[in-house]
Every structure is written in C-alpha cells, then in structure tokens.
Amino acid sequence: MSSKPSFKQAQVEFAAHIRNPEQNPMPDTIEDRRMAIYRDLFISSISSLLSGSFPVMRSLYNDTGWQALVRKYFKPEHNKTPHFPEIPREFVTFLQKQPDTDKDKPFLYELAHYEWLELHLEKHSIEIKTVNDDVTDDDLLNHIPVISPLVRLHSYNYAVHQIKSDFQPTSPLSEPIFMTVWRDTNYQVNFTEMNAFSALLLETLINNINTNGKEILSTLAIKHQYSEPEKFIQFGHQVFQKWLQQDIIISIKK
C-alpha cells in the first residue's frame, strides 16, 4: 500500500491518467464524464500552445495526427517543465531525442528547431541599439566588428525554410545549408540562407574578441588559399557593410 496520503495519491493518479490515459487508469473516485473534461482541457491547452509556437509544423498535420504527436510529447518522461514559456524548447528537445517520432517526416526536429529559434529571438529580453550611422566603411576593416547578440547561425540537413504542406522532403540534402536568424532593431525576426563563405565569416566574427575586420579577412584568404587576397578582402568588406545595415553587425570595438 502506498505511504502517500490519499489526496496526494489521488493527485498523482489524476495527473498520470491525463498525461497518458492508455497506460494509467483514471482514479476510482472520479467518473469518466468529468475526467474526460480534464483530459481534453489539458491536452487542448498544450496543443494550442504548440500550434502557436510551431505554425509550419502544425500545418503539416490533420487534427488527429497533431493530437497524436502532442500526446506523445505530453507523457511524463518528455514533458517535465512546469513553466509554460519553456514548453516549446522542451518540445524541440523531445523531437531531437525521439528521431523516429514521425518516420514520414524525418525533418521534424530540424523544422522545430528552426521555428523555435524564430520564437526565441522574437521573445528575447535583450534590447539592442546600433551605431551604424556613426560607423564608416573604413571602421569595419580597421576595428573589430561586433555581432548582435540576437543573431543565430545554424546548419541544417533539410531546407527548413522551404518546408510546407506540399514540400516535405524525405531525405536530407547532399550538403547542409546554413541559416542565419536574427532580430533587428525594429523587433522584426529575419532569416537568410548563407553560402559557406558567409557562414564561416559570420561564425568567425561571432567568436572574435580582438582581431579587426581586415585581419580576419586576410587570415581567411590565406587559410583558404585565395589567389587574389585583395579581391577577397574587398568582397568581405561588402558583406560587412550589408550586415551593418541589416543589424547583424551592430557596432565596432576600437
């Protein structure tokens, strides 16, 4: 016999049944008609939150399929956070750890991560200001370009930004793509696909502490054996200018 007080045991049984009614019988003290109300209420609440957080993913499912996916996540071993704002992040982790959740949609985790990234940046508490009006073109080369803390660079094996109901790839790309997602000073979340060079340059700037822009470009040109380093630097400088206007670069450090 359980050592827990009867009311505590009832709470545990109540929660277990709501989370996984197929595996956990409902408490004897509650009739099924009333229990059904709670089953629907809790799952509908979680379903609504996830639908709003992952609109593209939701559009790929009919109601029955979506409810089945939400119920898989709602089981205690996956849904542990008591904080509603953390549920989307936990849902992404659930899909990462359960790669076979939906074998018809092998891209599911990457799509979820991409959609969560947009949500995360949209809701982020950091406020950014730029000084791009005070930064000259030469400053971007002679000083240290500073990347916004609201910029994220990530590689994906699927074209996550193109997935929709009539485009659901069943196999990964031959090469990963690089996606940059960021929030600008107008609180708009933007995304762009980057080529390998731009992704490498952005990653270098994100991790850079004390090297100026020209030195970074010169080092990359030498490392990758470009035959015309000056043209490489010129091209990289143009990229810097574009990123400054887009609020990817927000300042320079002297």
Image (cartoon, helix red, strand yellow):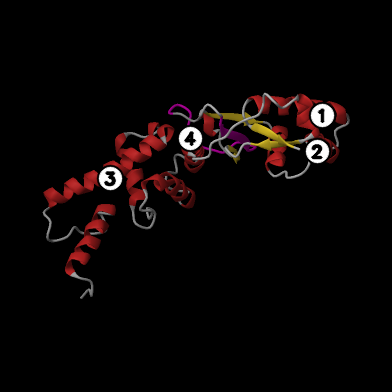
Residue of label 2 = 220
Residue of label 1 = 232
Residue of label 3 = 43
Circle nearer the N terminus (3, 2): 3
Q: Is residue 190 left or right of residue 58?
A: right
Is residue 173 inside the magenta stretch?
A: yes
Q: Is residue 228 above or below residue 16?
A: above
Quadrant location of the N terminus in the rendered image: bottom left
Real-space Cα separation, disc 3 to disc 2, in angstroms: 52 Å
Viewer-side label of 3, 4 = 4
| Residue located 13% across and 61% down the image | 28
| Residue located 41% across and 47% down the image | 86
The residue range painted magenta reads 165-184
Badge 4 element: helix
Is residue 64 inside the magenta stretch?
A: no
Disc 3 + disc 2, Cβ < 8 Å = no
Circle nearer the N terminus (2, 4): 4
Circle nearer the N terminus (1, 4): 4
